[in-house]
Image (cartoon, helix red, strand yellow):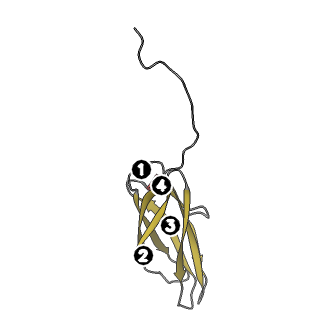
Amino acid sequence: KTIEFTGALHATVVKQVRLKNPSSKTLMYNAILVGRDADDFSLPKGNTVTVAPKRQTNINVEFTSRFLRPAEAVLLLISKRVGGINGATLTFSLKSEVKHIEPAGILKCKSPCYEL
């Protein structure tokens, strides 16, 4: 599954990944961001995710664009053994696209175009 982050340059975009646990045991995951641009993505609630039995939870993934080029990373959710049960390892492709640029400020200056 691919999660797309679209926004302005230097803006922070937040997306949610919903995890469902259909089993009767608690699932725990270690979340890891890997890839060329992994430093531009973050998990504000931490790297450990717990999903209670027969429940669901959301993971927030934040992206702040620093460059005009598209950023790419992978979100890995690696299961931790809890009470003898392991969940499947989950992977999500993270991609970004800068749609517009907001000026940080406007600077006016005067100078001669040509001087002997």
Q: Which is more foreground, mark 4 or mark 1? A: 4
Q: Which is more foreground, mark 2 or mark 4? A: 4
Residue 27, by quadrant, is bottom right
Amino acid type, mark 1: Leu
Residue where numbered disc 1 is placed: 68
Measure the C-alpha gap from mark 2 to mark 3.
Answer: 10 Å
Left or right: residue 96 versus residue 13 is left
Q: Position of residue 7 (x, y in %)?
A: 50, 59
Q: Which is more foreground, mark 3 or mark 4? A: 4
Amino acid type, mark 4: His
How packed mark 1 is, by other alpha carbons closer than 10 Å (few <14, some 14-19, many 20 or more), is some
Earlier-in-chain disc, 2 versus 4: 2
Identified at 39% across, 56% down, the residue is 70
Establish if 92 lies above or below 39: below
Q: Residue furthest top?
A: 116
Earlier-in-chain disc, 3 versus 1: 3
Q: Position of residue 62 (x, y in %)?
A: 54, 61
Establish if 53 lies above or below 18: below
Residue where numbered disc 2 is placed: 89
Earlier-in-chain disc, 4 versus 1: 1
How packed mark 2 is, by other alpha carbons closer than 10 Å (few <14, some 14-19, many 20 or more), is few
Measure the C-alpha gap from mark 4 to mark 1.
Answer: 9 Å
Residue where numbered disc 4 is placed: 100
Measure the C-alpha gap from mark 3 to mark 1.
Answer: 27 Å
Residue where numbered disc 3 is placed: 31
